[in-house]
Structure formats: C-alpha cells, structure tokens
Amino acid sequence: MEVPVNIDIDEMITYIVEHLPKDALAHDPKGGNRSWTLHLKLLLEEYGKERYELDSEYSNRSVGMSEFLIDFLWWDRRNESQQQMVLAVESEWYNIRPGLTDASRLYAEEVAKDFYKLMVVKSPYKLMTLSSEGGASRDLIVKRLEQDVATFVGHVKGEQYILLDSSPKDDWAAYQLLIAEDGVCRAHFSKREIRRGQWQPSRWKLTANVSRKPAMPG
C-alpha cells in the first residue's frame, strides 16, 4: 500500500499516553468512557493537524458531526486530486459488569468486533485503543486479534496495525503488526516500548469545543 504520510508510530503513541488519563472513570465519573473517548479524538485531531497537516473526521454531537464509517480517521486533503485515508481508529473500553463469568472473553469479543472494521477499511495505519484488565486479559485479546488477522484474506501489504491498551489495573501497553504480503498473512503483534517524558501537558480539556466542522470525504 502506498503511504502518503509516514507516521512516527512511537511518537504518536507517546503523545496519546502522556496526554490522556489512564482510567476513564476515575478521571470523569459522570462522563466515563464517552468523555475519555472524546478527549482521545480531540488529541488525535490536534496532533494530526499540527504534525502532519491532516484533517480529522469523527462523531462530536456538540458540533453536529457524525462519525464516518469508524470512530475516528485522518484524511489527507493536501492534494485535492489524490485524497485518501491515512489513519483509521477504533476504540472499545471495558464495560463488562464486574464479576461476570467469562468477562475477559466477552470483552475480547467486543474488541474483536471493532477490530474487524479496521481490517476491512482501506488505510495504511490502523489504531485500536482498548482498556483491558491487563495481564491474562490483555494476552487473551492479543491472541484473539492475531487469529482474526491470520484468517482474513483482504490484507494489503504495508498496512500497519497498532494496539494501545490503557488498562487501569496495569501499565500502558502498545503492540504493532506490519502486514508483509497481500491476502492471507502470518499474524504476530510485537510489543513496542513506550517512550515517556517528551511532551508538555496538552492544552486540550475534556470540555474543549471544536469550532470547525470538517467536510466529509468525497
């Protein structure tokens, strides 16, 4: 797959980790996951525009924006005759009732449903954000997604998948998978080291308003 913008994956991961609260409910008990997700989108919008001059599309009720296919995306409009998606993002935060039998497996299934959207969409970079219980729960999710990747026949060589887990019970964890060939391919997510201490506190707040309404791709 031709890559219109070379995204620094380590830098993007560090930017997210150092600007987001790790535990959504502890940070905003009333808004919970919804406000955490909006914060993530605002941060990605800021980073994509300032770092790579890319537009963003996502759902934001405060300005009447509806999501375009997936939770969030970066769209390259720098050349009007050659527009395309650069980054596709899906998020699935843990909302399984505590103590429920097979809670980890059920959450892995929910993550897999959103991850499937990333597999079918055409984008050189694909980011899946989640919030597992850490440990064995995290391992279960990674293995499940590797199984899904290994059985999917529509891969495009050069696509990169990134998993970012903000488990409130464990440390942040990041994984990457590079698609080596078209069609069916082997699947193994490699763990990436998260670099810290490189960013100043973000000016974005959970109550931030997005004044502009980007035009939809088309």
Image (cartoon, rainbow, N blue to C red):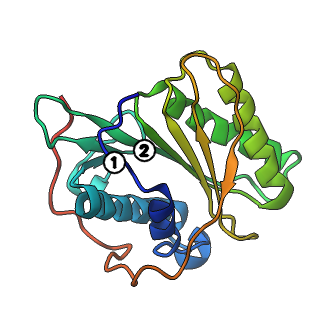
Quadrant, the C terminus: top left
CB atoms at circles 1 and 2 under 8 Å apart?
yes
* Residue 59: mark: 1
Alpha-carbon neighbours of circle 2 within 10 Å: few (<14), some, or many (≥20)? some
Q: 180 and 103: which one is in front?
A: 180
Measuring from the top left, give residue 178's x and y in whole percent.
57, 38
Measuring from the top left, give residue 152's x and y in whole percent.
63, 20
Q: Name the residue: 69% across, 64% down.
A: 167
- Examine the rendered structure and indicate whether residue 204 appears above or below residue 55: below
Of marks 1 and 2, the one in the foreground:
2
Measuring from the top left, give residue 154's x and y in whole percent.
54, 17
Measuring from the top left, give residue 15's x and y in whole percent.
45, 69
Q: Name the residue: 65% across, 23% down.
A: 185
* Residue 187: mark: none
Disc 1 from disc 2: Cα separation: 7 Å
Residue pointed to by mark 2: 71
- Examine the rendered structure and indicate whether residue 61 appears above or below residue 20: above
